[in-house]
Amino acid sequence: MSYEEKRAVTIGDSVYYSLRKNIMYLNLKPGESINTKEIAEQLGVSRSPVRDSLIKLQKEGLITTIPKKGTIISKIDLNRVEEERFLRLCVEEKVLLFFLKCHSDSDLAELKDNLEKQKECISKKDMESFLEYDDQFHEVFFRVSNKMLCWEALDNMSGHYRRVRFMALSDALVVNYVIDQHERFLKLILDENVEDLKILIELHITQQNKEEKALIEEYPDYFHCASDDIENFLKKDFLKMIK
């Protein structure tokens, strides 16, 4: 059960988190058709909480309703991936500066414990749990800085970027990069090295741009954009774009 599912307090919450989790981890694939009745039967609930959840997911850009055709899982929008990533970079860099000023030893201990759990997930090849712990690692920065509203807004608006992140984890090199950088986060926080932290957060959030190019070529049906947009995206270096 995911961290979000544990926070569910109503049947509607449970349905929403279950559907969202299956979208994030591509159990429900981009472009796949879904049916309210079938979902309700699978989850053992009435159609009402399913409809409410689909409306919420549609607002997040994860569900698309096509007139006279039905409802599908939204394909990954490359333009939205860029914007979601840019938004996270802008916000998290500022939050890290707050965290540097207010964190405690227990907060650092929590980050270290989380990092060990990430490594355990890698050894078990459990990438779903790894991504959960990855998110929780970054959530610590927001919680300690009293910026949870920002975190929740980012989480709700990052469904396209998050799906690409999960797909990129199929590459062992990417996973190792993430772990190495998380360890470096801890060191730079201990050293209070602001400038290197700014550089690291940019690299950490934008590094998967190259892996994304390979994913687009391997899974073109998962992505929604015109062929010209794909060609332009493949030529982009996101890190240079934000300098």
Image (tube, rainbow, N blue to C red):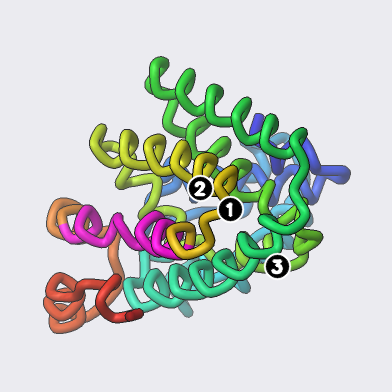
Give the answer, above or below, for where 118 lies relative to 189.
above
Report the residue marked by disc 1: 192
- Count the labels in the image: 3
Give residue 175's quadrant in the image.
top left
Q: Position of residue 113 (x, y in %)?
A: 62, 25
Q: Nearer the viewer, residue 80 or 116?
A: 116
Instruction: Indicate the quadrant containing the C terminus: top left, top right, bottom left or bottom right.
Output: bottom left
N-terminal of the pair, mark 3 or mark 2, is 3
Magenta segment range?
198-213
Q: What amino acid type should be assigned to the residue bearing mark 2?
A: Leu
Q: Nearer the viewer, residue 101 or 83?
A: 101
Give the answer, above or below, for where 62 lies relative to 68.
above
Q: Which mark is residue 94?
A: none
Query: Which residue is painted at 40% across and 43% down in the image?
Result: 181
Q: Is residue 38 visible?
A: no
Overall secondary structure of the magenta stretch? helix
Report the residue marked by disc 2: 188
Q: Position of residue 208 (x, y in %)?
A: 29, 55
State the separation of the CA atoms marked 3 and 2.
23 Å
Query: Which residue is painted at 60% across and 42% down in the image?
Result: 137
N-terminal of the pair, mark 3 or mark 1, is 3
Instruction: Indicate the quadrant containing the N terminus: top left, top right, bottom left or bottom right.
Output: top right
Badge 1 vs badge 2, beta-carbon distance below 8 Å: yes
* Closer to the eye: label 3 or 2: 2
Q: Which mark is residue 150?
A: 3
Q: What amino acid type should be assigned to the residue bearing mark 1?
A: Glu
